[in-house]
Amino acid sequence: MPAVATDRSTFLAAARSAAAGARVPVEVRVDAEPFAAYRRARDGTPGVFLETTGGQSGWGYFAVDPVDYRRIDPGDGSALGALAARLSDESLARGDCSVPYPCGAFGWLSYDVARELEALPGGAVRDRDLPRLELAVYDRVAAWREPHDGETTLRATACPRLDDHDDPAAAYERGRERALALARAATEGDPSVGPPPVDPGEGDSGDEVPGSVAFEGDCTRAAFAERVRRVKEHVRDGDTFQANVSQRLRAPAAVHPVVAYAALREVNPAPYSALVEFPACDLVSASPELLLERRGDRLVTEPIAGTRPRGKTPAADERLAADLRADEKERAEHAMLVDLERNDLGKVSEFGSVEVSDYRRIDRYSEVMHLVSQVEGRQRDDLGLADVAPLPADALPDGVAGTDADRLCAAVAAVFPGGTITGAPKPRTMEIIDEVEATRRGPYTGSVGAFGFDGRATLNIVIRTLVADGGEYHLRVGAGVVHDSDPDREYEETLDKGRALVTALDEALDRSLRVTDGTGSDGDSRRSEGAEADAGATERSGGRSERERRSDSESERGANAGDGE
């Protein structure tokens, strides 16, 4: 049974000292398995599920049923300016609440936000109608400590806003009821999901590999080798030291994103994983990389550079790890990119405060291992977004410049997009990427994350991520190219990085097909729960897709959609 953890007197004490318009949390606790709870609570509304097991946080979150939704398209002005403006409207008086994000703005930034920060040539084609920023504001969030195993204590928080005319006692009751409603939905709601965007039969690659998702690349091995060759020419000419070049894979979206994420978190748990179900697109992410964490004036980024596949045995795994540590190319590339991240943080940090607090550790995942470092700095309090980004004069509404939200977005602009997924020097390398890649990156190598109403932020880098859009899954995978890169090895590295996601989709599709044709066994009941839910969801949703339902929901809130680029 849900139990109220915030008593009235604690809330009233926080409310008395809070500024007008601040939000004050009310917390309710209940035992639940977090992902099952999200499935029960989501109900077709725009939702997010974040598992931030790395960095400073060690928390997971989900949020459903937003109170506001923003979509910023290329013709709508600055995405970061819009973000700063929206965040500046909020504040948090947390009282004794220890949940880092008891409410907040959750969403994603496209890689193409970089076009607001640098003058890129526009060579890559924008072939999908996706925004630069998609953001939902939630006054209720469910949180739990990570790591966890099975059921854990779920902390459902509701944060009523205290306006001048509000009675704090009435606000407490309102918050308590909303937090209890979220806790009840998380334990009593319907866990079923809607049908996949396309029929599962369209995701089957043929009789030879039943239940296998067939991905097609946007370039052949030879075409990717040509991309590598062109980058190496730029390296030789002194234009760049290293550039991250990607290819895009695509397949029918024959598995619901929720079911795909359920499989992915089993196959390849990652420290900055995310499931985003928004009107523009769905993101299924197993990102290992932190772009930025901000808490108070402390800024942290964790660059990843250097990859090997996992070994088939422990001994083979150790040999590959030793090879990765000793590889001069990987060591040099890693050092260069760590230096780039130090420079980026230095744009907004106090002089002398930037340091490498963890250098060249090895992190292991299901299919690959990486070299990882941690860089941190102490943010200056006198620099805003306009000091870091070339904003138009009207990008920030009156009253936003100089706020903490402005400084937060300045920190994002300083490190965005991550140097490990662009290269060094970053501006010229982004121009080269635009020249050699056929299409715009969209969410890939952008960021998914949370923005708190007290200046906190946790943002990943969108890699190892499926983008569900237009009945297809798009998966982009890349490799860092330097002067002595071998095209075949770089091509294979891209496939290694995508293998866990393909495996997860294969498993999810196989479960769906086995449930549909009646071949699932009792032993598969837990693993096929999502597929069973898929099979019965069409009737409950009236045959309409969840994307349509989410879009209708946001239309009622007056979601602002802009012109395409």
Image: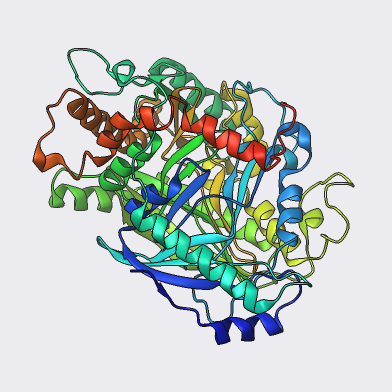
Name the residue nearer the viewer: 360 or 203.
203
Displayed quadrant of residue 195: top left
Above or below 520: residue 447: below
Q: Position of residue 87 (x, y in %)?
A: 70, 58
Q: Position of residue 108 (x, y in %)?
A: 57, 45
Q: Residue at x 29, y 17 (%)?
A: 201
Furthest-top residue in view?
207
Q: Position of residue 115 (x, y in %)?
A: 71, 37
Name the residue nearer the viewer: 191 or 483.
191
Name the residue nearer the viewer: 308 or 78.
78
Displayed quadrant of residue 286: top left
Q: Residue at x 9, y 42 (%)?
A: 523
Q: Quadrant of the N terminus?
A: bottom left
Q: Residue at x 14, y 52 (%)?
A: 314
Q: Is residue 220 visible?
A: yes
Q: Residue at x 25, y 29 (%)?
A: 512
Name the residue nearer the viewer: 329 or 36.
36
Q: Quadrant of the C terminus?
A: top right
